[in-house]
Image (cartoon, rainbow, N blue to C red):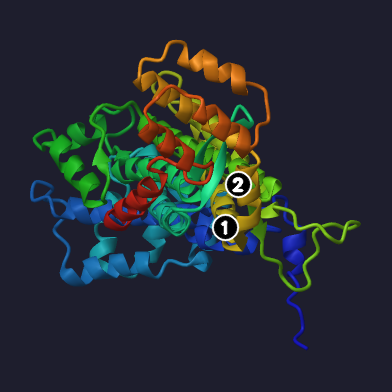
């Protein structure tokens, strides 16, 4: 028998479950949202800014770098690892300034390179630390959101497949918790999938903004050194070269409005997912879905029969945690006193927590969806036990033939009552409508009175296959 894998003791001592219990679920995010990753993004921005300046012919004091020097600099980015980040942290312990520590690290890194030593004062040229930080966070969020979209696509895939596979499986609807006109299981999965698809499309359109215009956004230092240079164009070109869109109007900080926009999309996405988790939880409770069991697993410490919908509950809880942070970020980040205060800095360091909770939730949801199996018997029994839902069909056909008080007539027969199929057939037989219409109504059942639900489910599957 193989030896079970035990978590390292270090994970048991971590303060948050993201770095403890759930570490294995979110470790792919470390390369994007950790402090190491933030430092790496800063290193990238500082290096690319220096290379960009060297290509400006108006800055004669900074000759254009040779291809070898440019590659030397970009190799620093490629080779940057946690051990190198630790060197930056050692410098920071003296400077007590994280961005200045990056500048000093890069100076030291290049001190044996003759071409770079000669222009060492152009590191961090005309920059405030926020010029580096805002671009670093924009790169972080853009990369992290791409990873999020990939995971979201897997979830939409599941709902699209369920929409197709369950498109014709009839199911009793419930509005206000009461029996209502039937649908299909596939159509209900398509509803969820399409809602997620819309938010995914908005994530694809999300813009990530940045600035590198100095201490208060006016290019003060840039223009005092080189008044003839069109700094707005130079800086816009640089920002765009990073895959970021330039924000032309800022104070010392990029105002984070796009961060709030991103947070609001993710809030809506998470809210839809919470709704889906609760609905599927409810369908499991009704017996519409069963759950596949796994050898050795336990559902309850005292009730051996239990197979609890824990994956959907886990997803719901982590989505709620993510939304709590996203709500705060959306409200807080766009607010800064006058030209700058530092309250946004500590908040932005929590983007990793947001994405961590979302990733755990998506993984739990995927796991839960994989366990589901349709209980055809339960669905059929529920439909057969509620033929009164055909009242809608009957009163609608009566209206077609101008029968007075159609709705009230059928309401008196059915409201608050549990009818059987024989009673429904009797109501139809007594209608004063053409025999052909009676025959049509007598052929419908709670199982086949589903409108175009099956087609809608199929249509969503097709839409998603074309979109992804």
Q: Position of residue 409 (x, y in %)?
A: 53, 15
Q: Residue furthest bottom?
A: 1
- The label shown at residue 143 is none
Q: Residue furthest right?
A: 302
- The label shown at residue 369 is 1
- In the image, residue 269 sits, relative to residue 341, either above or below, namely below
Question: Splitting the image into 4 quarters, where does residue 324 fall?
Answer: top right
Q: Nearer the viewer, residue 123 or 346?
A: 346
Q: Quadrant of the C terminus?
A: bottom left
Q: Nearer the viewer, residue 37 or 300?
A: 300
Q: Nearer the viewer, residue 172 or 259?
A: 172
Q: Position of residue 425 (x, y in %)?
A: 55, 35
Q: Position of residue 430 (x, y in %)?
A: 51, 25
* Residue on which disc 2 sits: 280
Q: Give the alpha-carbon distance from disc 1 to disc 2, as whole Å.
A: 9 Å
Q: Residue furthest top?
A: 404
Question: Splitting the image into 4 quarters, where does residue 402 fall?
Answer: top left
Graded by Cα atoms within 10 Å as few (under 14), some (14 to 19) or many (20 or more), the crowding at tag 1 reads some
Tell me, yes or no, if residue 253 can be seen here. Answer: no
Q: Quadrant of the N terminus?
A: bottom right
Tell me, yes or no, if residue 205 can be seen here. Answer: yes
The mark nearer the N terminus, 1 or 2, is 2
Residue at 55%, 58% in the rendered image: 366
Graded by Cα atoms within 10 Å as few (under 14), some (14 to 19) or many (20 or more), the crowding at tag 2 reads many
Judged from the image, the secondary structure of the residue bearing numbered disc 2 is helix
Contact flag, marks 1 and 2 (Cβ < 8 Å): yes
Question: Splitting the image into 4 quarters, where does residue 172 fall?
Answer: top right
Judged from the image, the secondary structure of the residue bearing numbered disc 1 is helix
Residue at 64%, 56% in the rendered image: 377
């Amino acid at each position: 028998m193989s030896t079970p894998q035990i978590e390292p003791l270090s994970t048991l001592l971590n303060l948050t479950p993201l770095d403890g219990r759930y570490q294995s679920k979110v470790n792919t995010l470390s390369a994007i949202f950790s402090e190491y990753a933030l430092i790496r993004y800063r290193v990238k921005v500082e290096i690319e800014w220096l290379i960009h300046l060297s290509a400006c012919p108006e800055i004669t004091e900074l000759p254009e770098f040779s291809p070898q020097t440019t590659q030397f600099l970009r190799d620093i980015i490629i080779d940057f690892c946690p051990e190198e980040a630790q060197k930056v942290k050692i410098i920071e312990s003296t400077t007590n300034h994280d961005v200045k520590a990056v500048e000093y690290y890069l100076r030291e890194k290049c001190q044996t390179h003759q071409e770079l030593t000669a222009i060492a004062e152009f590191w961090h040229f005309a920059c405030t630390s926020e010029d580096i930080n805002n671009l670093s966070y924009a790169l972080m969020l853009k990369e992290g959101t791409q990873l999020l979209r990939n995971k979201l696509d897997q979830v939409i895939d599941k709902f699209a497949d369920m929409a197709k596979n369950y498109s014709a499986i009839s199911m009793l609807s419930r509005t206000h918790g009461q029996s209502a006109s039937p649908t299909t299981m596939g159509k209900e999965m398509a509803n969820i999938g399409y809602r997620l698809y819309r938010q995914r499309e908005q994530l694809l359109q999300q813009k990530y903004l940045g600035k590198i215009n100095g201490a208060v956004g006016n290019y003060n230092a840039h223009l005092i050194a080189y008044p003839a240079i069109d700094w707005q164009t130079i800086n816009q070109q640089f920002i765009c070269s990073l895959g970021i869109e330039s924000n032309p109007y800022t104070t010392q900080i990029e105002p984070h409005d796009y961060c709030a926009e991103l947070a609001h999309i993710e809030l809506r996405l998470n809210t839809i997912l919470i709704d889906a988790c609760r609905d599927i939880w409810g369908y499991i409770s009704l017996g519409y879905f069963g759950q596949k069991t796994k050898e050795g697993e336990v559902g309850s410490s005292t009730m051996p029969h239990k197979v609890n919908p824990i994956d959907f509950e886990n997803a719901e809880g982590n989505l709620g945690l993510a939304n709590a942070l996203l709500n705060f970020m959306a409200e807080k980040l766009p607010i800064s006193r006058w030209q700058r205060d530092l309250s946004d800095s500590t908040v932005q360091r929590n983007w990793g927590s947001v994405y961590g909770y979302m990733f755990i939730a998506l993984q739990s949801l995927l796991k839960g969806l994989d366990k589901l199996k349709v209980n055809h018997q339960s669905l059929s029994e529920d439909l057969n036990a509620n033929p009164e839902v055909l009242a809608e069909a009957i009163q609608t056909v009566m209206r077609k033939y101008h029968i007075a008080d159609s709705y009230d007539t059928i309401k008196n027969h059915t409201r608050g009552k549990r009818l059987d199929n024989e009673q429904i057939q009797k109501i139809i037989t007594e209608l004063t409508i053409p025999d052909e219409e009676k025959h049509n109504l007598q052929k419908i059942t709670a199982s086949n009175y589903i409108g175009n639900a099956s087609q809608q489910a199929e249509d969503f599957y097709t839409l998603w296959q074309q979109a992804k």
